[in-house]
Image: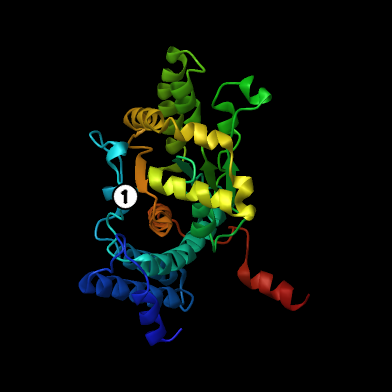
Amino acid sequence: MVKDDKKTQRDGKAGKSGGKPGKQSGKRIDRALKQAEDRIGMIEESETVAERLANAAKSSELLSAVWSLPPAQRLMFHHGIRVQDVSGDSTPGFDGDKFDGERFIDLSSSEIARYQRLMYANGVKGSPRRLLIVLQGMDASGKGGIVRHVFRQGDPMGIHYHGFGKPTAEELEHGFLWRVERELPDPGWIAVFDRSHYEDIVMPHVYGTYPEDVWRGRYDLINAFEHDLAASGCAIIKIFLVVSREEQKRHFLSRLEDPTKYWKFDVSDLDARERWDDYLNAWQEVFEKTSTAAAPWYLVPADNRWYSRAVVSELLRTTLKNMNMTWPPLEANVDPAEARRRLAGA
């Protein structure tokens, strides 16, 4: 796409409130993305592993520069924040438009794939590093789309996705964390949970399917579980996608109007919608009880799907980068010269 075509496409994109980003913020984002793209191009040209890792780290820093305030800082839950007050159609910390967001996601996903391969290689060699991403949100908040877009360049070998639904008869025979522990990431892997163990608090809270002392007792169990998980080398990113009632309604109607989306629609979604406030009150308590230093919650506005995907991409990439991993060396018993000699004669 030539430069003029890019400008035309940008001018046709709406910003977060239907307008266009300011000239200064647009120039800043363009500059940061162009610099990041140039630096990414230098990675494979690097002569040493150290140079390659340094260029990767610098490209990640340049990508983070598109944010006026880092999502890890701006969107982390703190006591006093109410999920009901989070505007689903806002784009806090990002002054660009959809075009900027999509461009950011494309570049960021390439670096996520790079760090993912690095973590996988370390896992093969015995590192306990791994990552768990928990995606929660009201129905039609975009959980599935995030997985497809953020990991668009990822390697399936090393990514484990699992969606949690209503517990099966077998699962009900065990403690509520039993089915979660079975899906945790192996060393070097990324696991993505579409819904999670938190459903085992929210659902009985809203519908009274368990005595209050039972589901309230799960807060401490979850905190201890996540604390131990983090201490063992597993980073945890917990995300709640905040979608507005109006945006949810729009998505529900689109599912009813498009035969290819019928499979997504379920009458139970409407039942949950009728208890909107009950759900948000239950989730508010979850955030207050389980947002910890080891496993904080992030409340991410999700009406603009490009924005929520960009946020998750930023959180994921910076988490992997901050693991400060390097490529594993050859095993001590491997003589490169001898290996080359044998290959030459093979």
Instruction: Identify which residue is drawn at 44% across, 46% down.
Output: 248
Q: Position of residue 243 (x, y in %)?
A: 39, 45
Label 1, on which residue? 72
Q: Quadrant of residue 64?
A: bottom left
Q: Position of residue 173 (x, y in %)?
A: 64, 19
Instruction: Identify which residue is drawn at 63% across, 25% down.
Output: 171
* In the depicted structure, whether residue 196 falls above or below residue 144: above
Q: Nearer the viewer, residue 188 or 110?
A: 110
Callout 1: SS: helix
Residue with the most extreme front position: 257
Is residue 123 shown to the viewer in this render?
A: no
Is residue 62 shown to the viewer in this render?
A: yes
Q: Position of residue 73 (x, y in %)?
A: 27, 49
Report the amino acid beneath label 1.
Answer: Ala
Q: Nearer the viewer, residue 107 or 111?
A: 107
Q: Residues within 10 Å of mark 1 (few under 14, many from 20)?
A: some
Q: Nearer the viewer, residue 98 or 315?
A: 98
Instruction: Identify which residue is drawn at 44% across, 68% down.
Output: 107
Residue with the most extreme right position: 346
* In the depicted structure, whether residue 248 falls above or below residue 118: above
Q: Position of residue 235 (x, y in %)?
A: 44, 44
Q: Nearer the viewer, residue 267 or 63?
A: 267
Q: Is residue 226 left or right of residue 91?
A: right
Residue with the most extreme left position: 24
**Render colour scheme:** rainbow
- Tag count: 1
